[in-house]
Image: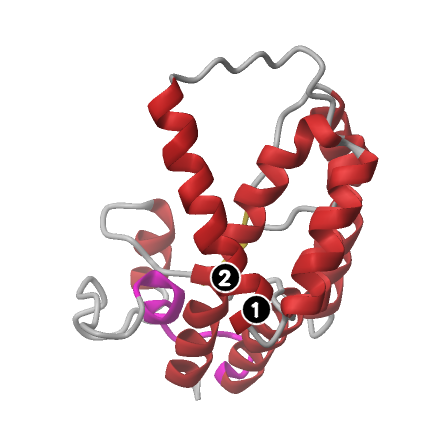
Amino acid sequence: IPESIHKFYKHGIIVNAGYIVGFDKEKDSVAKTTLECIEKTFIPANMVGLLFALPNTQLTRRLALEGRLNENFDKVRENVGGQCVSGLNYETLRPREDILNDFKQILSEAYKPERYFKRIRQLVPLLDCSRKHLNLPFKTNIKNLHGFLKLIIAMGFKAPYRKHFWRTLLSCSFRNRKALRYAVALMALYLHFGFFIEHVLERID
């Protein structure tokens, strides 16, 4: 998988990934192997969710035959952080607590600031942007510059992970300036991920 993902980078394509935890055939090593995949692919944005049995699917029909669907399984609970926390609407084969602990481990480890920003530093040198020619209107460039300055204040001075921000910004500037725009965009995503992951982990607890 890492080799295949790195081929995308060599064509200037950034990859986001999604992972689902809670399948019947999962083993206790699912957190370890998922984290290894995340680290080896250098993918910064990794969305992790709990398996949700959707209506009118083969999974739901099988679980119904096995008598494992929860009552009102098709109702998403409110104020819980979306599908990330609303899953496992069925009786699991593995202990439910083990699945939730694996889910928590993947999220908490993958989104530690040092790991998230390191993956950006690893990704950017591989990202071939030589064929990208972006000519934006002057007003758009001014707007983007204003947003960049706000980002520097938020992440470079106020955030507790500011050292990782500066290290990544400087590293990407020197190692692949043509990909700097995309590196900054990926760093900006952490303004959302940092708070959202904390919310999800609290809901899981």
> Is 86 on the left-hand or right-hand side of 37?
left
Q: Residue at x 42, y 82 (%)?
A: 204
Q: Position of residue 130 (x, y in %)?
A: 71, 14
Amino acid tagged 1: Phe
| Mark 1: few/some/many CA within 10 Å (<14, 14-19, 20+) | some
Q: Which residues are magenta?
A: 82-96
Q: Is residue 96 above or below residue 56?
A: below
Q: Is residue 89 magenta?
A: yes
Q: Is residue 113 above or below residue 175?
A: below
Q: Quadrant of the N terminus?
A: top right
Q: Is residue 55 magenta?
A: no
Q: Position of residue 21 (x, y in %)?
A: 53, 63
State the residue position of label 1. 157
Q: Position of residue 65 (x, y in %)?
A: 32, 61
Residue 147 visible, this orientation? yes
Q: Secondary structure at mark 1?
A: helix
The image's mark for residue 153 is 2
Q: Are marks 2 and 1 in contact (CB under 8 Å)?
A: yes
Residue placed most toward the observer, 72 or 49: 49
Amino acid tagged 2: Ile
Residue placed most toward the observer, 115 or 56: 115
Q: Position of residue 196 (x, y in %)?
A: 41, 68
Number of numbered markers: 2
Q: Residue at x 54, y 56 (%)?
A: 152
> Is 128 on the left-hand or right-hand side of 198?
right
